Image: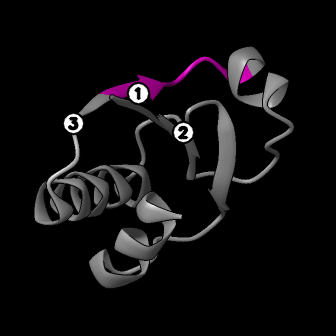
Amino acid sequence: MKKLQILGTGCAKCQQLTLHTEKAAQAIGIEYELEKVTDIDQIMSFGVMVTPALAVDGVVKVVGKVPSVEQLKQVLVA
């Protein structure tokens, strides 16, 4: 099971990234656990200075943008 973490304070882009990430994960059929990380100190502990960001199994894969569902599928299978 992959651990997917959305790093952001809950802004519109963060919500969009959450939606796209869930759609991508469901489309490729992976088991996942989705966690929203909204605490600034916790976000910064990932080395992220610009949100939204996506971490997969603790590794930051996307920072400061909302990739398309197709792009996120590539990130999730990599």
Does residue 38 appear to the left or right of 10 in the view shown? right
**From the viewer's perspective, is residue 72 above or below residue 49?**
below
Residue 3 screen position, x and y as percent? 43, 29
| Residue drawn where x is 79% and y is 43% of the image | 48
SS category of the residue bearing label 3 = loop
Instruction: Work out how far the residue at label 3 is from the one at label 2, CA to CA, in angstroms.
Output: 22 Å
From the image, state whether disc 2 or disc 1 is nearer to you: 1
Does residue 14 appear to the left or right of 48 in the view shown? left
Structural crowding at the residue carrying mark 3, measured as other residues with C-alpha within 10 Å and reported as few (<14), some (14–19) or many (≥20): few
Instruction: Work out how far the residue at label 3 is from the one at label 1, CA to CA, in angstroms.
Output: 17 Å
Mark drawn on residue 8:
2
**From the viewer's perspective, is residue 48 above or below residue 69?**
above
Residue 15 screen position, x and y as percent? 31, 50
Magenta residues (range): 34-40
Mark 2 belongs to which amino acid? Gly
The residue indicated by pointer 3 is: 31
Residue 37 is covered by the magenta coloring = yes
